[in-house]
Image (tube, grey):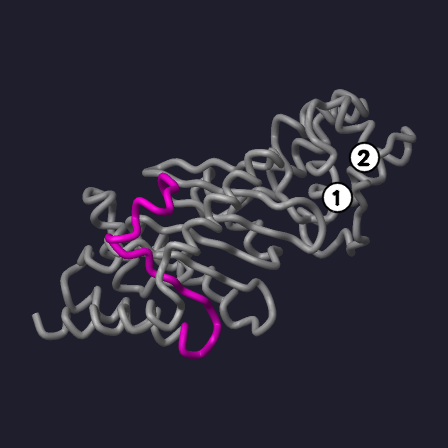
Amino acid sequence: MTHTRRLDPYDSPRAFYGAELRRLRDEVGLSQERLSERVFCSPAYIAHFESCVRLPQEEISKLLDDLFGTGEHLQRLCKLARRSSYPDYFADAADLETVATHLYDHAPLLVPGLLQTREYARALSLATAPFMPEDVIEKHVQARLERQRLLKNPEVPELWTVLHEPVLRTAFGGPEITARQLHHIAALVRTRRVVVQVLPFTAAAQGFMSGMARIMTFAEGPSMVYEEGAHRGNLIDDPALVAQYQASYDLIRAAALSPMASLEMLESVAEDYGRS
């Protein structure tokens, strides 16, 4: 059975949305399970909305307004709650990572955002959008760096990342920037803030997942997966599919180098860049 932690509704627009949804649901005498059936979503969605684990969704908010007879009340609150400095396709995932207990990143080509240096993030933005105005690039880079405040929390979330060897060998921004990026990851590992494993070229066939993906677990509610490609992202909450991602990730971790051997490779490749 799903449940909802009690929050101060005046903490944020998202908290107010959750409190209003819970109030309206209680007024009509529907459980989270019964309400989810009426608006064609899973009970976990309702629980996540009410406990501020997940940002509200516009389509579901419209269905809820129709069901409760509240005009556009929840839809307006939804728009306030969803204001974000991130692209719309990533806004939900960025929000979820702030309340996750564990983050498991799979990175076949690029350093994940939480581990990027400013220089690397800027070089990546220029590579993916070469005609983007400078002020927009800076906005994107700054938003990415602000996410990294999560790493200053000594308790949660715990971050585990598997980097494929091509991530180390692709010099975004040139050898010097990539060397500093790899040294930065190594420093995070040495402070025991993250666990990083490298999947070498020789083991790539033993553990396969296509594309960038993140598995997120929560103190309340089921795990979710966020997968990302160029200019798009997708959240997955189907339990069976999430379980398949978890099984694939476990195989990749088993095929990857140990954390200590991975740290040695990170520092070795960084030194190679420094000599080039």
Amino acid carrying label 1: it is: Glu
Q: Which mark is residue 208?
A: none
Is 200 in the magenta?
A: yes
Q: Secondary structure at mark 1?
A: helix
Q: Residue at x 62, y 36 (%)?
A: 239
Number of residues whose C-alpha sits closer than 10 Å to that of mark 2, classed few (under 14), some (14–19) or many (20 or more): many
Q: Residues at badges 1 and 2 in contact (C-beta under 8 Å)?
A: yes
| Quadrant of the rendering where the N terminus is positioned | top right
Give the percent coordinates (x, y) of residue 211.
Answer: 36, 41
| Quadrant of the rendering where the C terminus is positioned | bottom left
Q: Secondary structure at mark 2?
A: helix
The span from disc 1 to disc 2 (Cα, nearest Å) is 10 Å
Relative to 13, say whether 271 is above or below: below
Give the percent coordinates (x, y) of residue 71.
Answer: 74, 24
Query: Mark 1 = which residue?
Result: 50
**Relative to the observer, which residue lies in front, 274 or 85?**
274
Region in magenta: 189-211
Number of residues whose C-alpha sits closer than 10 Å to that of mark 1, classed few (under 14), some (14–19) or many (20 or more): many
Q: Which mark is residue 32?
A: 2
Circle 1 or circle 2, nearest the eye: 2
Mark nearer the N terminus (1 vs 2)? 2
